[in-house]
Image: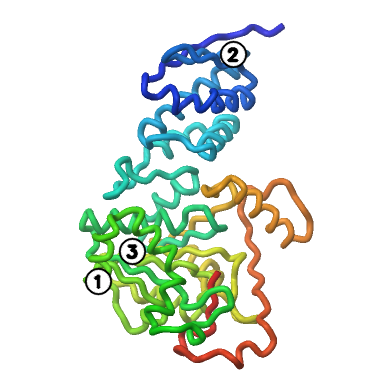
Amino acid sequence: MSELSEQVVELGSAEVLEFCGKNDEKLRELEAQFDVRIVPRGTTIKVLGEPTKVGQACRLIEHLLSFSRSQNGLSKRQIKYAVESIKSEREEDLKRIFSDRVTLPLKKRGVAPMTANQKHYLDAIRRCDIVFGIGPAGTGKTYLAMAMAVHHLISERVRRIILVRPAVEAGEKLGFLPGDIAAKFDPFVRPLYDALYDMIEPERARQLIENGTVEIAPLAFMRGRTLNSAFVILDEGQNTSVEQMKMFLTRLGNDSKAVITGDVTQIDLPAGKESGLVHAQRILADIDGIAFVYFDDRDVVRHELIQKIIRAYDAADKGAYQQELPLNYQSSTRARVPVQGAEDRIADVTEDMNPIEGV
């Protein structure tokens, strides 16, 4: 019988319920993950089991406590990622991730990365003037880019935020929709509004939009402009053509940053038309000052089922079910085939907008 070990971890009185969970459910999860016994007593947690496993569990608890204290709570996803990092001996990742913060008006404790790739993403945005964030939905690409944009604005590193998106989504064209261009475009940029309102008081956000400090516009409206002292985000970048991506990237002026987000498995361009995002990966990867950060299903921070859904669809695209994705995320770039004759029925909003379809 192997030698048993025992260690005690101290909690603050206000942390006990949050850390242990209802009916100690979080502790039971940690017990199962590390094959140890965890006994809460007042403001202490006693961990018993094999020395190596007890050591791992206690190091994890210390990291989780540090994160909980700085972020005001823990999600199941955060705990799961921390467990995976400790077990795979990536403890340094946790230290770097848990120590990072993006300060924002409505976030008392700021916004923090939840995975190593999210940490790389924030570091790349700080370091480079052009950053591409590529990966599946729910990985925080747009939200973190928006957090950095708001942080740059309130710290007066830029004078404005410009949010850009292709003008159509899911097979719908703006010309078929009622209202002026603003009314037509509004539903497609609602995710950008949601992120903005989560970080700035709604009334203040409306003022910033009205006075032009924050601008949300179709991609086509960027033509001919020079964007100085601006933080520019191009969302759904996979649905730009090569020409449109070039046009967007060459708008960047002095003291500006650009972040391009997209998922190259969700390209809705007409068959035979190359995605500007895919093309950019191929020709810009080796240029200093431009960074590409890739996300995968392990970075999903929405509902825990989303990770499983992404894996299932990815497996279906490959033609066979698989339990785990490769460590290096390799995305398909197959375009969806448009409905026969659909292009003939498209109302022409602008020459730049019409071929693009978003997700």
Please give the residue where the numbered disc 3 appears in the rendered image. Answer: 257
Q: Amino acid at mark 3?
A: Lys
Asked whether, in this view, residue 3 is left or right of residue 26, the answer is right
Which residue position is annotated with label 2? 51
Residue at x 54% of width, y 77% of height: 357
Q: Residue at x 58, y 46 (%)?
A: 298
Characterize the local packing of mark 3: few (<14), some (14-19) or many (20 or more) Cα atoms within 10 angstroms.
many
Please state which amino acid type lies under the numbered disc 2.
Answer: Pro
Residue 264: x and y in percent read 58, 66
Looking at the image, is 215 positioned above or below residue 56?
A: below
Say whether residue 127 is visible: no
User: Real-space Cα distance between discs 1 and 2?
Assistant: 61 Å
- Residue at point 47% right, 53% down? 140
> Can see residue 61?
yes
Say above or below: 26 vs 161. above
Q: Secondary structure at mark 3?
A: strand
- The N terminus is located in which quarter? top right
Specify few, some or many for label 2: CA neighbours under 10 Å numbering under 14, 14-19, or 20 or more: some
Residue found at x 66% / y 75%: 336
What distance separates the C-alpha of mark 2 from that of mark 3? 49 Å
Q: Give the percent coordinates (x, y) of residue 344.
A: 61, 93
Instruction: Tell how many labels.
Output: 3
- Seen from this angle, which residue lies furthest right? 320
User: Disc 2 or 3, which lies upstream in sequence?
Assistant: 2
Report if the CB atoms under discs 1 and 2 are less than 8 Å apart: no
Q: Residues within 10 Å of mark 1 (few under 14, many from 20)?
A: few
**Residue topped by disc 1:** 210
